[in-house]
Each structure stands twice: as structure tokens, then as C-alpha cells.
Image (cartoon, rainbow, N blue to C red):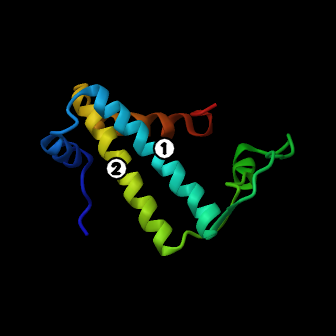
Amino acid sequence: MAEIEQQTFQDTVTEYLIRHRSILDVQSKLTEATARVNRAIAKSVTTCGCIEINAGRQRFPAELSLTEVRDLMQSHLNGDLCERCREVLETEIGAALFYLAATSSLLGLQLEGILRKEHGRVATLGVFHLT
């Protein structure tokens, strides 16, 4: 399948954003969509059981390099998404992306430019990006 450019996706979202054109509607739909992503993950654990979450404090020796620490850090996830849960999560994440693109459009922002800038920040700052 050909790779879809972010700008093309945003243009398509803008074209079909009719019912929820108000920024308030789009904000609430984005919040709802991200909540549905969280709920789908929870159901993958509690209803299906295809994945498990085993979370605890992340511990690592202070003398390790950042690269070594990254290799020791855990996601707290065990298992793999089953096909059904994968499909549900892909759909819910897609809806969240739709409303993120809609938010960008309504505010006159270009999602592709935002992605490019964020990529530059991540690439430049590396592991310090989110600290």
C-alpha cells in the first residue's frame, strides 16, 4: 500500500469534517477518541487477556549510560495483541488521528509541519527530549 502523506490525510479530514465543525465539538471528540484508545487497551487486558500489564518501579544502576538504561527500561506489557484487539485499537487510534488532524486544520496548523518539527526536536535532543 502506498504511504499516505500527512498533508493528504489532513486535507481529506478537512474535506469530510462537516458534522463536528466547531472547535468545541472537535476537542470533545478528540478527548473521547483518546479515552476509547485507553479503554481498548484496558479491555485487551481485562476482557480478552491477550496482553498483560505488570507494572512496577523502573530500577537501573546509576553508573549505566543512557543507551544501556534505555535497553533496561520495560514497557510493562507482556504478550501480544490478538487480531481482534489489534483491529479495535487500530480503529480507535485512527479516530484519534482523525480528530487530531481536524484540530490542526481548524486552528490553521499543518500537521505535517508539526510532525517535522517534533521529529527534529526528538532527533536533536534524543533521550533528553521528554525529560
Looking at the rendering, in which quadrant would you find the C terminus? top right
On the image, the x and y values in percent for residue 47 come to 60, 65
The percent position of residue 42, horizontal first and vertical second, equals 59, 55
Q: Secondary structure at mark 2?
A: helix
* Between 121 and 3, the one nearer to me in the picture: 3
In screen coordinates, is 97 left or right of 43? left
Is 7 rendered above or below residue 84? above
Q: Residue at x 57, y 39 (%)?
A: 126
Give the label on residue 95, or none.
Answer: 2
User: Where is residue 5 drawn, in percent x and y?
Assistant: 24, 51
Q: Out of 70 and 98, give the one closest to the viewer.
A: 98
Q: Quadrant of residue 106?
A: top left
Crowd around label 2: few <14 · some 14–19 · many ≥20 (10 Å):
some
Question: Does residue 114 lie above or below 2 as drawn?
Answer: above
Q: Which residue is mark 1?
A: 35
Q: CA distance from mark 1 to mark 2?
A: 11 Å
Amino acid at pointer 1: Ala
Residue 46: quadrant of the picture = bottom right
Q: Position of residue 71 (x, y in %)?
A: 71, 55
Q: Residue furthest bottom?
A: 83
Q: Where the N terminus falls, by quadrant?
A: bottom left
Going from N to C along the chain, the mark reached first, 1 or 2, is: 1
Marks 1/2 in contact by CB < 8 Å: the verdict is: no
Question: Residue 59 vs residue 118: left or right?
Answer: right
Is the residue marked by circle 1 packed among few (<14), some (14-19), or many (20+) residues within 10 Å? Answer: some
Which label sits in the foreground, 1 or 2? 1
Farthest-out residue, front:
47
Amino acid under disc 2: Ala
Residue name at image x 34 percent, y 39 percent: 100
Residue displayed at 57% across by 63% down? 44
Frontmost residue, 1 versus 23: 23
